[in-house]
Image (spheres, rainbow, N blue to C red):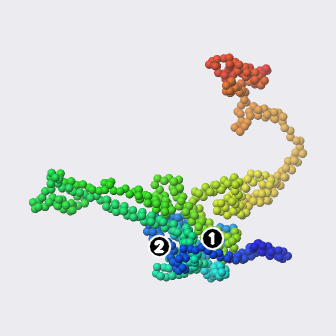
Amino acid sequence: MYSQLIGDVLNRLDGQRRPSQQEITDANRAMTPPPSKRVTDRSIAYSDRHRGQWFRPEYSFDEIQIAQDTDSYVFRAVQKKVNRVICAGMSFVGANPDAVLYIKTRLNAMGWASQRSVQQLVWDTFHDLFRFSNCMWVKKRSSQLSMGKTRKGFGEIDLEPVAGYFILPFETLEFRTKANGEFKKVMQKMPNGEKKEFFPRDVVHFFTNKKPGFTVGTPELFPALDDIALLRRIEENVEDLIESNLFPVFHYKVGSDAFPERYGPDGTKETDIVKTTIEYMPAGGIYVSDHRHEIKAIGSEGRALRIDFYIGHFKSRALAALGTSSVDMGEGGAANRSTASTMSKGMMLDVEAMTHVVKEFIEFFVISELLLEGGYNPLSQEDMVYVKFGVIDKDDRRADENQQLMMLHGNLRTLGEARSALGDRPFTDEDYEDTYFKRFEETHSLLKGMTPGSAASEVLAAHPASNITKEAVASEAAFVQKQGKSTSTSAALGRPEEKSKSNSAANSAVNKAKPSNQHGTLASAKTNRDLLVEDADGSVYVITCDFDIDPAKIPAWKQEVLTRWDSLDKNIISFDTLAQTMAWRLKGNDQ
């Protein structure tokens, strides 16, 4: 529609001054597309039971936060996934450089105004998504603090431009929804009773694993809480077991049936004397007694339950629920590099999937709104700006690059399709001029084919990566032309040079006597001849002759050798010896 309007305007201006391409681009950008009509969801959500009143989400996010703060496995699992995203990085790409620059400028301005960069905002978003599977941004709108322009929203409402984005603590949020589950309002309620309400147009709700009819997404860590709690209870029991069996119980036996314990003159029993002695004995003391005393250490003696298998099972269960493995937690064990890479593959796939989720939300709810405020059309592929996260799994990335390169070389894909499959934008003419081929290989090939007056010289003179100038090419061509005229003049004034027949014949004789090939020149003339002879069994022998062979005698000579070989005893002479002995019959008549 917009291109048709521009075409009509240009047709009317045919008799007047035609606008420049920049003016056409500015006019197209100023025609912001009208907002689409809102489509209402006709389903009924579970939140309808609250009848429009404030309610807490379906899941307790406080429990997840407490588990993250108190359990090392939960904390490290979330942090390792976030660190993967941080190391990968993030950038903005698009077909329109002006639109990309505009988005970067707007986000940098928001970062300076809020003293919080967009990268930190995205990292915190991933942190909430990995632990809560939910995250919510709140917008600060202000026409004085923002570079954007006021625009029309749904219902023809004037919306001020966004000046900043901030993350709301999701565990403090309450909602009021319509019957279909859409937000009417969002309220942040702090433990001290302080409240603040937000309209749906001023918030961005990121979520994953959201079931139909639910208000929020199901946290991925929620099923892992029971597994973590069970593992910790088992570990507490192991701690009690260690404490109870760490120090053995010593049993002191005094006397026997044959030698019962004795009493002292004052009536004190021998067991009381031993008890008192042991109580006041130092830690490194030694107790000496006669043969009637027996001291025995009583411990578990291998009769306690072996619990290491159970701990390993529930530990693996807890790590699986967290989306990690023992290798991710630093427990390599006997795993080699290939096994460790395979065990970590699941976690990297989860991280990569989450980057796609965040990419879609940012592009649809954040970048599109910023483009509308800047006069760009987010429905146009040329104006749209996209989020690009870095490589999460570098091994898979290298495999994909090699596969796309093979398909490109096999003519199964174009250059644009291969780059799009790798997540890169297609090459422009300017990008192609900056490739390795254009800057180095092409000039190197042209230099090989460069001769005075050739097309390669002219191309090199116009190539931006070459130091050869058009003046140098012209000077070289003029010099060669001048040299050609000088040679033709001297040849016309004198007698033409004649080739020496004797020299030519001598060179021909030398070449025949001492031939040359890729391995070198023969040092001396070859004086012998080689002849191949085949016996009745098919074996081939080489017979060397130091004289010229008469070719007409070879067939009869071979038949004669075979006839003589059949008549002789094979144990007396070999076939090659016989053929060598009869080789003199091949001499010519003049020898």
269 left or right of 558 in image: left
Looking at the rendered structure, the secondary structure element under dot 1 is helix
447 left or right of 209 in image: right
Of 232 and 89, nearer the camera is: 232
For the residue carrying disc 1, how many other residues have a C-alpha within 10 Å: few (<14), some (14-19), or many (20+)?
A: some
- Say if residue 435 shows up in the picture: no
The residue at the point 73 percent across, 30 percent down is: 525
Q: Report which quarter residue 134 is drawn in.
A: bottom right
Residue for badge 2: 62
Q: Residue furthest left?
A: 265
Of 53 and 299, nearer the camera is: 53
Say which amino acid is labelled 1: Glu
The residue at the point 63 percent across, 18 percent down is: 572
Mark sitting on residue 302: none
Looking at the rendered structure, the secondary structure element under dot 2 is helix
Specify the quadrant that holds the C terminus: top right
Say which amino acid is labelled 2: Asp
Query: Which x, y percent locates residue 19?
Result: 79, 75
- Say if residue 456 shows up in the picture: yes
Residue for badge 1: 363
The residue at the point 26 percent across, 58 percent down is: 249
Of 156 and 591, nearer the camera is: 156
Foreground label between 2 and 1: 2
The residue at the point 80 percent across, 76 percent down is: 9
For the residue carrying disc 2, how many other residues have a C-alpha within 10 Å: few (<14), some (14-19), or many (20+)?
A: few
